């Protein structure tokens, strides 16, 4: 089934709500009890254990179909705007959503880079050659520029110039970070590993990087806590399925319980004894 041109679809949608603030609400069920399972949201019944499942064996499906499936389900994904420099000094930046932090001490991040049509992408090759890279967190104020950097430009193209973003010199690695970014890190290559497909051909290269410097704009911090970054100021974007990006406009806190505080409670004991919550299933 053919789709209409992107600009036709885009034109039919409402304008971006630039005035939207990040609002913190109560969680879906503030009075959740141990053993309760599903909450009482209107669509909760769709998640009941007896709902219909489909099971897929990856080897029976093409890589393109698996990509579409997994990218649509494993969401939202944080996006790394990775900056590297080639051996010849050409700067490269590109967004990657196969990215996350894997350790706070030592501070360590992971980025996975898929191969290009002709082998390693510039990002992967540059990291292997120079043993370092920078990562900037993409904010809403420059998301279009970051997206343009995903263009399959020739290796000789300076994506900083292409996107209109500004390189800011790093202190430890050769790769600059983005001056417009409110949060960036410099990372030295710790380890890399190349995954292989069933036929033996190379797939993604996974890079672990040790964070050596952190650069953050002053305005993103809570004035009462120098280590707390406020989401409503950072305005990070995420990747969803297809070509969709997500934003944070609502959030809620969930209290982290301690076993010493609730382990012997009536609710917990009832749940462990197979009796559900003390007042029955939450919301059902």
Image (cartoon, helix red, strand yellow):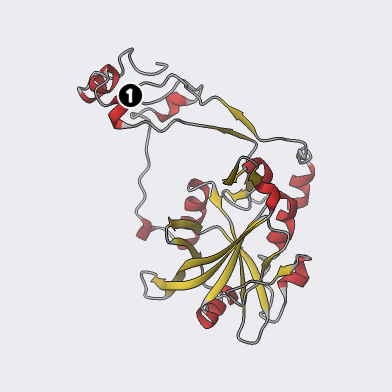
Q: Is residue 258 left or right of residue 217?
A: left
Asked if 282 appears above or below 205 in the picture, the reply is above
- Report the front residue among 1 and 231: 231
Q: Residue at x 70, y 35 (%)?
A: 21
Asked if 196 appears above or below 230 in the picture, the reply is below
- Report the front residue among 207 and 71: 207
Asked if 226 appears above or below 167 in the picture, the reply is above
Q: Position of residue 182 (x, y in %)?
A: 67, 55
Q: Is residue 50 left or right of residue 11?
A: left
Q: Is residue 243 left or right of residue 201?
A: right
Q: From the image, tell me which residue sits under label 1.
A: 34
Query: Badge 1 local density, few (<14 within 10 Å), some, or many (20+)?
Result: many
Q: Residue pushed farthest bottom? A: 88
Instruction: Classify residue 167 by image quadrant.
Output: bottom right
Q: Position of residue 157 (x, y in %)?
A: 72, 78
Q: Position of residue 197 (x, y in %)?
A: 39, 69
Q: Is residue 234 left or right of residue 60?
A: right
Asked if 211 appears above or below 237 in the picture, the reply is below
Q: Residue at x 72, y 76 (%)?
A: 158
Residue 235 visible (yes or no): no
Q: Residue at x 33, y 28 (%)?
A: 50
Q: Position of residue 155 (x, y in %)?
A: 66, 80
In the structure shown, which secondary structural element does the residue marked by tag 1 occupy? loop
**Where the C terminus falls, by quadrant?**
top left
């Amino acid at each position: 089934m053919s789709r209409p041109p992107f600009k036709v679809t885009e034109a039919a949608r409402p304008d971006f709500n630039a005035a939207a603030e990040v609002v913190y609400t109560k969680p879906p069920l503030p009075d959740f009890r141990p053993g309760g399972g599903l909450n009482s949201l209107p669509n909760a019944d769709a998640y009941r254990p007896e709902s219909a499942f489909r099971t897929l064996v990856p080897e029976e499906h093409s890589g393109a179909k698996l990509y579409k499936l997994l990218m649509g389900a494993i969401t939202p994904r944080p996006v790394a705007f990775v900056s590297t420099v080639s051996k010849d000094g050409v700067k490269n930046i590109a967004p990657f959503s196969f990215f996350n932090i894997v350790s706070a001490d030592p501070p360590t991040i992971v980025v996975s880079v898929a191969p290009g049509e002709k082998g390693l992408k510039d990002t992967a090759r540059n990291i292997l050659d120079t043993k370092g890279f920078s990562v900037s967190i993409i904010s809403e104020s420059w998301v279009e520029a970051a997206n343009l950097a995903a263009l399959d430009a020739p290796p000789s193209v300076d994506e900083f110039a292409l996107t209109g973003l500004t390189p800011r010199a790093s202190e430890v690695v050769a790769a600059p970070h983005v001056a417009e970014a409110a949060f960036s890190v410099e990372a030295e290559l710790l380890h890399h590993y190349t995954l292989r497909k069933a036929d033996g051909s190379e797939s993604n290269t996974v890079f672990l990087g040790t964070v050596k410097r952190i650069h953050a704009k002053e305005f993103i911090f809570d004035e009462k806590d120098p280590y707390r970054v406020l989401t409503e100021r950072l305005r990070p974007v995420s990747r969803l399925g297809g070509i969709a990006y997500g934003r944070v406009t609502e959030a809620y806190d969930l209290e982290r319980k301690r076993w010493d505080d609730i382990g012997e409670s009536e609710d917990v004991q009832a749940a462990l004894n197979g009796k559900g919550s003390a007042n029955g299933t939450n919301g059902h």
